[in-house]
Amino acid sequence: MTDKDLRLAQLGKYSGLTMLRQGVAMIIAFASSILLARVLGPELKGIFGIALLVPTTTITLVNLGIGPSSVFHIARGVYTPSQALRQNIKLALVLGTSSILLASLVIMIGAEHLFPNIAPKVLWLSLIYIPFGLLAAFSLAVIQGKQDFEGYNYVALGTQLCGFLLSVVLVWLLRLGVAGAILSFTGGQLAGFVGARVILGRLDSPQEKDSLYEYVRKLLPYGVHSNVNTAADFALRHIDQFLVNLFLAPSQAGIYILATGLAERLAIMSSSPSALMLPRISELENSESIRERLTPIVTRHVLASAAIAGVIASTLASVLIESIYGPEFAAASAVFRVMLPGTILLSFTRVLASDIAGRGQPRVNASISLAGLALTVALDSILIPRHGIDGAAITYSVVSTSTALLTLCYYSRHTGVPWSDVAILKRSDVERLVRVARTQWIKRLQKVSRVGRR
């Protein structure tokens, strides 16, 4: 089996383009993070981060897994992108309304106990994010399922850029504080939906294959397991922020949220390959030998890249955080370093999880995430009161490492691929990277030469 059979060139091209886009998005995210930290300070930044958990958590709980299920069914040819898009927009509006009602009930009943030191009006304002977040996510899933990764990159980057530009206007220039930050992030989601709609507007518009009810019924078996996994994984990545605010104070939550945000930026190594792997593995339903060779190659590269980036980030963390974000955020550097082992392992876990989901087994990822969530709550409840945000960071790394090992064990046992093939970079990988880089460099020089002769 050759690299051509694996379509590594195509995967590498789109993964590279996606990573380039995410590199630009990371710069924008850093700029946005710096702006919010400098203008809002630790306390208001913490309030904003916790307030945003209300709509994002609600969306995660009630979205029925429509996004990843759309990707899976479009990649397998069950629905065309046009058919899925129309149904997804309807579902976003229906689920958006339900989500607002659910979140409103939570705020009315438990705001004082669940979100101490946060004004209810901020929580109410955050609900505006819900419908636009669903519309953007469901539309972007259609582009991902269609494997139009160029369009996927444009929309994702546009969402990030619009959110940042709105932050400049609303938070920095108009000084609207937390309200401005919420409106900025909401505006970014609206821009994402509009961008996705423009790109997908060029598609054919055949008659709908099924009614909305039939569409949901077909997507639910995969979607429910995927939704459980997404909800558990979301809670796994964010419940520590909620508990820091609950046990400590918004100012400590602001510092911790900054550290977790930086850790998520480091995990960018995995988001582009994992986004590509879900539709690719779904498409290879009858090509197990290709699957078993493709995924280990991707995971080895991702893990090695994340480890190198982690060493660099750890070295520069103290200087950069204090000089860029200000001395009041200096404690975030120690928290960030404690998170690094978990962050690095999380990178390659996401790729394996995409492979498992692409095989139609999202319930496996859900089970692992639920186990991780239970461990997170138990450890955080012990460590945060005793060790503050450092305790939350320890929990993050312990749980991320545990879920990574569980995912690796399942994948290796299920496929028969040795764990070393998944985790350890090989000489052939380095040779392939050198060969591809040389080929791309020669092509670029030839292209420049042809342009010069003209």
Image (cartoon, rainbow, N blue to C red):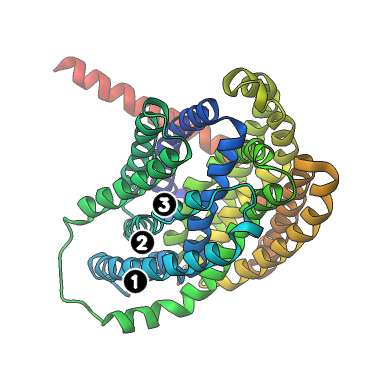
Q: Amino acid at mark 1?
A: Val
Q: Quadrant of residue 136?
A: bottom left
Frontmost of labels 2 and 3 is: 2
Within 10 Å of disc 2 (Cα), the crowding (few <14, some 14-19, many 20+) is: many
- 344 horizontally vs 99: left or right: right
Image position, residue 62 (x, y; %): 47, 69
Decide which of 293, 235 is in the foreground and name it: 235
Q: Residue at x 33, y 40 (%)?
A: 158
Q: CA distance from mark 2 to mark 1?
A: 12 Å
What amino acid type is highlighted by mark number 2? Answer: Phe
2 or 3: tag closer to the N-terminus:
3
Residue assigned mark 2: 138
Name which residue lies at 63% across and 43% down: 303
Residue indicated by mark 3:
7
> From the viewer's perspective, is 397 left or right of 103?
right
Residue 104 percent location from the top left of the image: 47, 65
Tag 1: Cα neighbours inside 10 Å, few (<14), some, or many (≥20)?
few
Amino acid of disc 3: Arg
Inspect this view and state whether residue 56 appears: yes
In this picture, residue 161 sits left or right of residue 38: left
Mark 3 vs 1, N-terminal side: 3
Q: Is residue 284 visible?
A: no
- Quarter of the image with the C terminus in it: top left
* Mark 2 or 1: the one toward you: 1
| Disc 1 element | helix
Q: Nearer the viewer, mark 3 or mark 1?
A: 1
Residue 284's disc number: none
Q: Residue under label 1, please give it.
A: 94
Q: Write down the quadrant of residue 12 in the picture.
A: top left
Residue 131: percent from left, percent from top:
36, 60
Rounded to the nearest angstrom, the CA distance separating label 3 from label 1 is 39 Å
